[in-house]
Structures are given as structure tokens and as C-alpha cells.
Amino acid sequence: MTDREIDYIYEFKKREYAEHKLRALFFEVTSRCNARCEHCGSSCGDFVPKDEITADEIKSVLDDVNEHYGAKNIMLYITGGEPMVRKDLFEIMEYAHNLGFRWGMTSNGILIDEEADKKMEKAYMETVSISIDGTKELHESFRRVPGAFDKICKGIKLMQKCPTISDLQITTCVNKKNLDQLDDILQIVKDLGVKDWRIIEVDPIGRAKGNTDLLLSPEETSRMFQYIIETRKKNPDMKIKYGCGHFLGNELNIELLGTCYFCFTGYWVASVLSNGDVFGCPDIERRPELIQGNIRERKFSDIWENEFKNYRTIDRTSNKKCKACPDWKVCLGDAFHTWDWDENKPNFCVREMFKEEYDKMDKAVKVFLEYRDKILKGKAEEAKPKKETKKKKTIKKTTKKDAKKATSKKPTTKKTTKKVTKKTTKKRKK
């Protein structure tokens, strides 16, 4: 990526922070869940919170968003907890569809049956992402729900017949326990007839924070990236994606995501949490200074337009080391959801993870730039106008061939000699 392209991306991000056009709204409709996943970023469980937002409160937010931003311009992403533990979920989403919203859901898939499938169709659900994190034994151990795997597979087959669903996706959270099972998971995805497979790493948030039994090492992370690239080439008929994650270096981001790195939270993306708090992405650490307001006290549109100031500055996740980094203008401190707010540093830094490789690359780039500058300087010297120099007269040496030519020349005729002699005699008389 050229310096000009990097500067363009940097200026584009600054402009987008200022304009903050809402494009995606997450609704964490509940923090209740029927699974106990080891890696859960929200640390959800089976407790019933007293302050869970009601159906009427969600509808009120939908009305407000539609009025100010237009339902057709916003995609709704329904998350939890497990969204389907709410018995009124599809009634709420049917209301959203009638307003003109498009919507999709992230689910563990355990509660999907024929009745749920019919409700999805009626509410016009368009996208769904279901988690499969290993073979039957490993998945059920990781999610801590015995018997879940077969229910999930049955639910996926049911949803494939739902006419409103245009994108059915399987998501795998890669960790130390399932890194060596990726080929097995790929085969499960294929056997289910699913063409869209999203691969993400377990981030150090929620229950996974500090869990060394789950978090990948730099070498393991590199293996995961290489696996995605190679598996894509072998399976061109499938969409094999790296999920929204981190700055990985410009070339690798383009290779895996098809675009340079962006973290959209707070300027394209917002969420309403299960207690009514207005927030950035649901995966962000739930810190008081990052909560922007509550829909029970103010309208969502008022909060979106007048708050989020700490989300909309170009150095929102930064320190001196980050700003001095060659990748700063694109990385900008990496993902908001993995920034360590207490230590003021990123928990994920590709340059720290692969320090030796980056040091070698930086040295190589430095040598190349020096060499390039020398070449350019040399070309500049060549381009300067040169002074004209007088050509020296060269005396041609006579060769044997020249001598022969000279002797072989015909003598002058008598007529010409007579004329010459007459002229010379006249001159003498005078």
C-alpha cells in the first residue's frame, strides 16, 4: 500500500468519525443464555435480570431510529445472550420488518425447531449465524451443553428451507482446543450443505480474558491465518471468511477481508444492551465511561447525535508507542473491543505478536528505500542538461588499401593538361 493510499484512508476515517452515519444497530435483546460457553465475551448465564428491556421499549427505539435515519438504511443485528430465550422475540422482529428494517440473528442454534423456523419466515429474518466450534464431543464440552450438537445440525437443515434467509452462516471461534480440528469442522460445514464459514479467534474478553487454555499464541494465530488462505484456494465455491477482528498488516487484511482495516464502532455501529444502555459494539468492555446513555432516559437518536465523543476522535485508542508506529494511520490502536483501558495499550498488536518478523521487514524496507533514493538521485543526475563539447578532428590513417586506390587512379587527359598549361603561360606573360 502506497503512502498516498494510507493518507487517503486516514483522512477518510477522520471524515467518517465526524459524520457518524448510523449503518448497523445491534440489539442485545437479553443477557440470558441456555449455554455456558468458556469464551463468552458477555459472560452470559441463566439468570433473569430485573432490568431487561421490554418489547415496547425495543419498539419505541425502532420507531425513533426509523424516524431519524430511515429503517431501510439500517441493518439490525440481534444478539444476546441467546436471543431465542425471549418468547416475544419474533413478535418484536415482525414489528421491525413491517417498519422496513432488514435483520439477522446470531444464535447458538440449540432452540431452533420447526415452530421457530416458521416464526423466522413470518418475521422475515434474512441472515443467521450459528456457532459450531468442533466435532460433537468438543463442541458440547466447549459450550457446556450435552446433546446440543445434534439439535444444532437439525436446526441448520430446517433453516435451509426458510425462503427469507439469504445468508446462513456457520461461525467457529478458534482456540487452542480446536485449532487442530479445523479440517473436521470444515467437513461438518460441507456435510450440512452450508457455503458460508466464518472463522474468528477467541479474544481476551469476558470469560476468555486471561484464559491461557483458550487464547492462541502468535504462532497459532499465524497458523489460523495460513489455514484460511489455503482453504479458500482449495474451496473456491465457498465463502470462507475471517471475522471482523484486528489490524493484521495491510496486505494480510486485504487478503483475508478484501479491504483495509476498519473498526466501525461508535461512528457506523451502535448497540442497545439488554438493560437499555446505549453503547458501541456489544463485545466492548462494559465500562461506565463507555456507556453513552440509556433509552429509558433519553431517545436513542439524541444519544447518537450528541454523545459518543470518546468514540469519534482519531486517537480514541492510542498511546505514544502506537502513534510512533509505522502502521498508526491505518491501525489506529487496533480494535476498540480489545483495548486495555487500565493499561492504555492494545491487547492485540500484530507488531508485538510477530516482532522478529516485523523487525526484519522494517530493516529490509529501510535498505530498499535507501537504495530507491540512490536510484532516483542517479536518474535525476542523468536528466540534467549536459554541456555541448566540440568534436576533435580526427586524422585518418592511410592503410595499404587506401594506397592501392590512390595509385590505381586514372591519369588526367591531354586536353585538360593543355588547357592548364595555356592558362599558366598567359599569366606569366602578363
Image: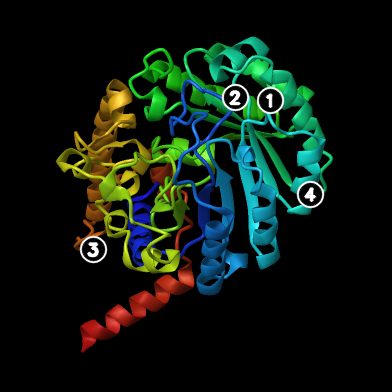
Q: Report the mark closest to the observer, 4 or 3.
A: 4
Q: Are marks 4 and 1 in contact (CB under 8 Å)?
A: no
**Residue 53 spot, x, y in % from top left:** 50, 51
Mark 3 burial class by Cα count in 10 Å: few <14, some 14-19, many 20+ = few
The mark that comes first in sequence, 4 or 2, is 4
Identify residue for label 4.
121
What residue sits 39% from the left and 65% below the top? 298
The mark that comes first in sequence, 4 or 3, is 4
Which residue type carries mark 4?
A: Glu
The mark that comes first in sequence, 1 or 3, is 1
Q: Are marks 4 and 3 in contact (CB under 8 Å)?
A: no
**Residue 175 spot, x, y in % from top left:** 48, 19
Q: Is residue 313 above or below residue 345?
A: below
Q: Quadrant of the C terminus?
A: bottom left
Identify residue for label 2.
230
Q: Are marks 2 and 1 in contact (CB under 8 Å)?
A: yes
Find the distance from the CA under tag 1 to the CA under tag 3.
Answer: 56 Å
The secondary element bearing badge 1 is classed as helix
> On residue 385, which mark appears?
3
Find the distance from the CA under tag 4 to the CA under tag 3.
Answer: 76 Å
What residue sits 39% from the left and 37% below the top? 249
Q: Are marks 2 and 3 in contact (CB under 8 Å)?
A: no
Q: Image quarter for residue 326?
A: top left
What residue sits 36% from the left and 58% below the top? 13
Instruction: Count the marks.
Output: 4
The secondary element bearing badge 2 is classed as helix
Identify residue for label 1.
234
Visible in this render: residue 335?
no
> On residue 220, which mark appears?
none
The mark that comes first in sequence, 4 or 1, is 4
The secondary element bearing badge 3 is classed as loop
